[in-house]
Image (cartoon, rainbow, N blue to C red):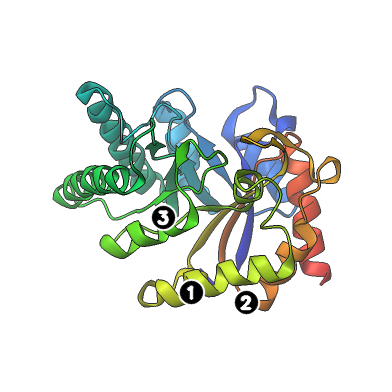
Amino acid sequence: MDKLNFLTAGMPIKTGNKGYSRAFEILSDLELNGLELEFVRGVRISDESKEIVKNSPMVKTIHAPFYINLNAREEEKIEASINRIVETATIAQEIGAFSITYHAGFYLGMDKDKVYQTIKTQTGIIQDILQKNNVKVWIRPETTGKATQWGDLEEIINLSKEFEYVLPCVDFSHLHARYNGISNTYDEFAQIFEKIGKELEEKSPLENFHAHMAGIEYTSKGEKQHLNFEESDFNYKDLLKAFKDFDVKGAIVCESPNIEDDAKLIRDYYYSI
C-alpha cells in the first residue's frame, strides 16, 4: 500500500440499518479510508451487499468468525474452523479485500510447542486449499489478549515465516492487555515494528501492515473489554508516532465501541504529528 489507512471495525454506528452504501458515504465524509467486514457468527453476506462492497474503491479487510480454534480437541471443530477461514479468504478475494484476520486458537492447557505445531499443520492445509482454488489473499492470525489464547507476537511471526501468504495482524491493545499493562510505550511499540520488519523482511511487512487498535480494559488474566481511547490507559498517541516514524503503510482498524469517532480521532492525530 502507498499509505497508512484508517478503517472502522464494521459499518459506522451512524449507518443504522441502511447498509454498506450508506456506510461508505459516512466513512468518506469523515475522511476515513474503509472498513473491516465483521463476520462475527458466520461467513454471511448477501449478493447485493457483496456487489456494493466489491465496487467501492475504499480499503476493505475482513475479520473471520470468532468460532475458530485450529487446536480444538474435536476433529469436526478443526474442520469447521478451516472451512470458515477458507470461506472468508474466498470472499475477501471476490470483494477485493486487503487481507483477513482471525483468532487462531486456544492452548487448552497443552504444551505451547505442541500447540504451535498443530496450528502450523492446520495453516498448511488452509494454504493448500487456497492455492488449489487460486485464492491469493493475506491470511493473518491476530495477536490475542489473553494468555489462554494462542497468538503471542513471537508465535505469529514464526508462523508467518512458514507460509507465503501468512503475515501478522498486530492488535496492539491485545498485547497491552495480554501482558497486564506493558507494551504501552513508544520504545516498546518501536521494538515491535523493528522485530517484524527484520524477521519478515522478505515480505516487506511494514509496507503491508494490518493492525487493530482500541482502548482496552484488562485484568491480571488479560483482556476484559474494549473501551474508547480516552477512557483507557492505552497510549495510542505514542503508537501513532511510531507508525509515522517507521513509515508503516497498510490498514489500522479501530475497534473502540464508538468506532467512527475514535477512528477519526486517531486519523486526525496521526496527520497532526
Left/right of residue 21 with respect to residue 50 in the rendered view = right
Of marks 2 and 3, which one's residue comes earlier in the chain? 3
In the image as oriented, which residue stretches furthest toward the left?
132
Q: Tell me whether the residue at label 1 lies in contact with that at label 2, contact meaning CB atoms closer than 8 angstroms.
A: yes
Q: Residues within 10 Å of mark 1 (few under 14, many from 20)?
A: some
Three-letter amino acid code of the residue under disc 1: Gly
Name the residue: 21% across, 49% down.
124
Residue 223 is situated, as x and y percent measured from the top left of the image, at 63, 36
Per the rendering, the mark at residue 197 is: 1
Q: Is residue 32 visible?
A: yes
Residue 219 against residue 230 in the figure, above or below = above
Residue matched to label 2: 246
Separation (CA) of disc 1 from disc 2: 10 Å
Label 1: state its secondary structure.
Answer: helix
Of marks 1 and 3, which one's residue comes earlier in the chain? 3
Image quarter of residue 44: top left
Per the rendering, the mark at residue 156 is: 3
Pick the quarter of the image with the C terminus: bottom right
Q: Nearer the viewer, residue 236 or 118?
A: 118
Left/right of residue 168 with respect to residue 89 in the rendered view = right
Three-letter amino acid code of the residue under disc 2: Phe
